[in-house]
Image (cartoon, rainbow, N blue to C red):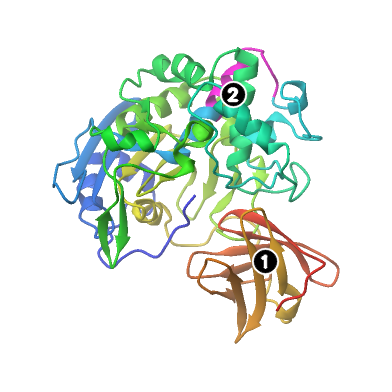
Amino acid sequence: MVNPVNPAPNTFNASPSNPIGALAADPQTAAERLAALPSVAGVQVAGVVDGSLAVGAAGVTDTETGEPVTAGTGFRVGSITKLLTAHLVMRCVLDGRLGLDDPLTRFVPGPWDGLLVRHLLSHSTGLDAGDIFVDTGNDDDAIARYTAMLQDVGSLFPPGATFSYCNGGIILAGRLVEVVTGRAWREALREKVLDAVGMRGTRFVTGVDAEHDLGTARGHVVRGGEPTALPRRIDNPMCTRGLDPAGGTLVSTAADLGRFTLAHLRTPGTEVMRTLHAPAPGGVSTMLGAGLGWMIWANAAQSSVRVGGANPGQSGLIAADPTTRTAVVVLTNSDQGINAVNTLLDAPGPTPGPQPEPAPADLSRYTGRYVSHAVTAEITTADAGLLVRAEGYPDIPLTPRDRRTFDSPGGPVAFLDFDDHGTPDRLRLRMRVMRRDSTAQPR
């Protein structure tokens, strides 16, 4: 997931009172205005309003060839796939195959004590498996092999205790689907979701096969304020079949995802997916936490559910207002595209919830080493704030906003689980929790 950033000077504004409705009502205008931004190469927008679907497209699929984006252009949708996986699990729940409060061990043997089905879909498993990208093959057993590998990961917190974005938990949900249906995840998704709602332009393309997939937009990264084309072939293990349920290989269109969203909002029993299950205190103030497959957002203008996704050089999101059943889907072939869209959806003004606590007086209590499988971060005091040092990353300055939330150039971070002396035990950085290493001292 990508955090919101400040808008560029030429970013246009959607309606502050109903940003989702404003984008959905005129998707072609929204697409054209987004494509005019320097951080976006090409874009599709689908709007769902009053039970109908409209689509807009603008920009180019490839900055080197100048080929235009059309309504039929494919995009690598990344973690938007997680919502489809959650919907598929919910279909199994509604069919009576399993329950949200069933223990995972009932279906998938492993060291999953206390882990319930709902924890998989709400990013609250506690598993230290946020971003384990390993190629486990390109056959029907790839997800099973990935799941077996997860048996060796540790825990960051007890299941259900808080929110921490976890690709591994969603892949476990995909394996759960395979066990209860007796079918490969791709086959189950195709039958129960893609074919059921008419998503005919949606398919699976691994990263290495993307080289020959000319019907899909080419990925771009923003360098020096301009999008630069990436190689079509993606030699990245995140784009392999074992990562399928979390977003490794799905290629779709805004129109297809609009059809899915419309069907999802109409499906009885899915309301529970759009309610808060795992609160995310601190950090992005307008993101309250996770539902089941969705993230729950609320700002001065509107409450909504969202799911974002990214693959190398591509990013997008779905945002929906469950009350009015209005939704917008935006797909871009730029790594910064999702940031521009989130900025449009986050209207300024006071946010709901409790008032933030005062900024801390003693920053030394925050210093120390915080660890996860992905990174070890050393936090020290610096000037009027903190400094994060991690191998492979530039130094990250942190400025206190309140006791729990600190601002950084890459977005807000949160400190969690304070003891009686005001010392935090965990850090949420880039939506992933890290635990304090009590045996280490900052260097």
Image position, residue 143 (x, y; %): 57, 28
Rounded to the nearest angstrom, the CA distance separating label 2 from label 1 is 34 Å
Decide: is 231 above or below 144: below
Given the image, on which type of amino acid does mark 2 rest? Val
**Could you say where residue 286 lies in the image, as x and y percent from the top left?**
53, 55
* Label 2 CA crowd tier, 10 Å (few <14, some 14–19, many 20+): many
| Residue 24 visible here | yes
Image coordinates for residue 18, horizontal then vertical, percent:
38, 47
Q: Which residue is mark 1?
A: 404
| The stretch drawn in magenta includes residue 438 | no
Crowding at dot 1, Cα within 10 Å, few <14 / some 14-19 / many 20+, comes out as many
Asked if 122 appears above or below 418 in the picture, the reply is above
Q: Residue, x 64% and y 45% (percent of image)?
A: 129
Range of magenta residues: 86-99
Residue 89 got which mark?
2
Q: Quadrant of residue 360?
A: bottom right
Image height of 64 relative to 204, above or below: below
Q: Is residue 319 visible?
A: no
Q: Secondary structure at mark 1?
A: loop
